[in-house]
Image (tube, rainbow, N blue to C red):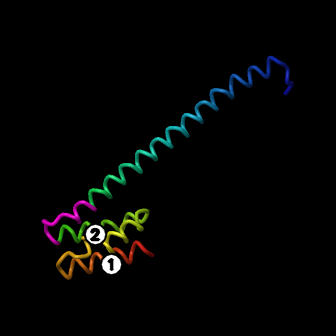
């Protein structure tokens, strides 16, 4: 290919839109990832609030504790709450076992 000024302009007119499209796709993917992270945090927060309620069925809390296994990125806060927080003081052997199992699961 002969790199005359006309060819360089034509090449630039072809490549520039592709670069803009690639940048827009990356930007969109980053925005989507951040939105997903925020939605995941909101679900995690709702589960933790459900566990912290003083009322509610033990089975519901056991299910919530089990669901926390899917949130390994929050393992430090889960460990802190389960080790030091109110959740640890709940009554019921089944719930206590579920909380211990979840704590072991997120730590490994």
Disc 2, SS: helix
71 relative position to 97: left or right:
right
Rendered-image quadrant of the N terminus: top right
Q: Position of residue 92 (x, y in %)?
A: 17, 79
Residue 88, quarter of picture: bottom left
Comes first in the chain, label 1 or label 2: 2
The reply to whether the magenta stretch includes residue 53 is: yes
Residue holding disc 1: 101
Task: In the displayed orientation, state which residue is furthest to the front.
Answer: 84
Q: Residue at x 21, y 80 (%)?
A: 94
Residue wearing tag 2: 65
Which residue does the image show at 80% across and 17% down from the upper left? Answer: 6
User: Along the line of sight, which residue is nearer the eye, 87 or 19?
Assistant: 87
Residue 93 position (above or below residue 16): below
Of the pair 83 and 58, the residue shown nearer to us: 83
Q: Position of residue 45 (x, y in %)?
A: 30, 57
Q: Is residue 105 magenta?
A: no
Image coordinates of residue 87 in percent, x first then y, are 25, 71
Secondary structure category for the residue under label 1: helix
Numbered badge on residue 60: none
User: Could you give the CA–CA distance between mark 1 and mark 2, rounded to whole angstroms?
Assistant: 9 Å
Image point 23% across, 71% down: which residue?
62
Front-most of residues 63 and 56: 56
The 10 Å Cα crowd at callout 2, few under 14, some 14 to 19, many 20 or more, is many
| Picture quadrant where residue 23 is located | top right
Please tell me how crowded label 1 is: few (under 14), some (14-19), or many (20+) other residues with Cα within 10 Å.
Answer: some
Residue 102, position in %: x, y? 33, 74
Could you tell me which residue is drawn at 41 percent across and 45 percent down? 35
Tell me which segment is drawn in magenta: 48-58
Picture quadrant of residue 43: bottom left
Q: Quadrant of the C terminus?
A: bottom left
Label pair 1/2, CB-CB below 8 angstroms:
yes
């Amino acid at each position: 290919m002969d790199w005359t000024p006309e060819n360089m302009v034509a090449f630039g007119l072809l490549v520039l839109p592709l670069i803009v499209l690639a940048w827009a796709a990356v930007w969109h993917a980053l925005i989507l990832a951040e939105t997903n992270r925020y939605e995941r945090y909101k679900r995690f927060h709702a589960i933790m609030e459900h566990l912290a309620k003083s009322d509610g069925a033990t089975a519901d809390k056991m299910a919530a504790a089990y669901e926390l296994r899917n949130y390994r990125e929050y393992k430090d806060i889960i460990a802190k709450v389960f080790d030091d927080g109110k959740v640890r003081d709940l009554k019921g052997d089944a719930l206590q076992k579920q909380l211990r199992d979840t704590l072991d699961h997120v730590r490994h």
